[in-house]
Amino acid sequence: MTLVRLYFIKHDGNEVEVTAECGASILQIAQENGLEIEGACEGNMACSTCHVIVDKEFYDLLPEASDEEEEMLDLASGLRATSRLGCQLLVTSELDGMKLILPKESRNMIGF
């Protein structure tokens, strides 16, 4: 079991360090550590409520977003060039030390 350190920047600016197992999703890790990230569709890529902003240093280490993920990201509030869906990002050892910003708000479009 390989563990990595991740740093979540909350919307109030406070940084939270967590330790995570490789293979877990960013959404799962954030929720297990009590961070404010909704994941309304429970990680099925049917919403944008697990939107995170990835530190530029680590963004290029991530696999490319699928067309479906890009479509869901178009619904996210506060979209940036390094935005991704937390449900689609799986932790690998290369991501040790990655910082992720949790946006101030999310837009839940499920049911609309």
Image: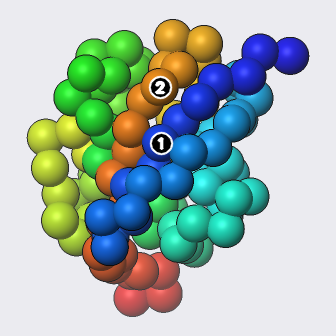
Residue 58 in view in this figure: yes
Q: Residue furthest left?
A: 81
Q: 58 or 107: which is nearer to us? A: 58
Circles 2, 1 touching at the beta carbon (< 8 Å)? yes
x and y, in percent, of residue 3 in the image: 73, 22
**Residue 78 on image: x %, y %:** 17, 65
For disc 1, the neighbor class at 10 Å (few under 14, some 14 to 19, many from 20) is some
| Residue at the limit of the structure toward the bottom, as seen here | 112
Number of the label disc, if any, that sits on residue 77: none
Q: Which residue is mark 2?
A: 97
Between the C-alphas of marks 2 and 1, the distance is: 7 Å
* Residue 5 rendering spot, x and y as whole percentages: 59, 30
Question: Which label is found at residue 7?
Answer: 1
Q: Secondary structure at mark 2?
A: loop
Most foreground residue, 63 or 29? 29
> Which quadrant, please, contains the N terminus?
top right
Q: Is residue 41 above or below residue 7?
A: below
Residue at x 60% of width, y 13% of height:
93
> Which residue is at 33% across, 22% downward?
58
Q: Is disc 2 surrounded by few (<14), some (14 to 19) or many (20+) residues within 10 Å?
A: some
The relative height of residue 44 versus residue 64 in the rendered view (above or below) is below
Q: Quadrant of residue 81?
A: top left
Residue located at (61% from left, 55% from top): 30
Question: Secondary structure under badge 1?
Answer: strand
Count how many numbered circles sit on residues in the image.
2
Indicate left or right for 29 with 109 as reference: right
The x, y position of residue 32, in whole percent, is 74, 58
Q: Amino acid at mark 2?
A: Gly
Describe residue 7's horizontal placement relative to residue 11 as left or right.
right
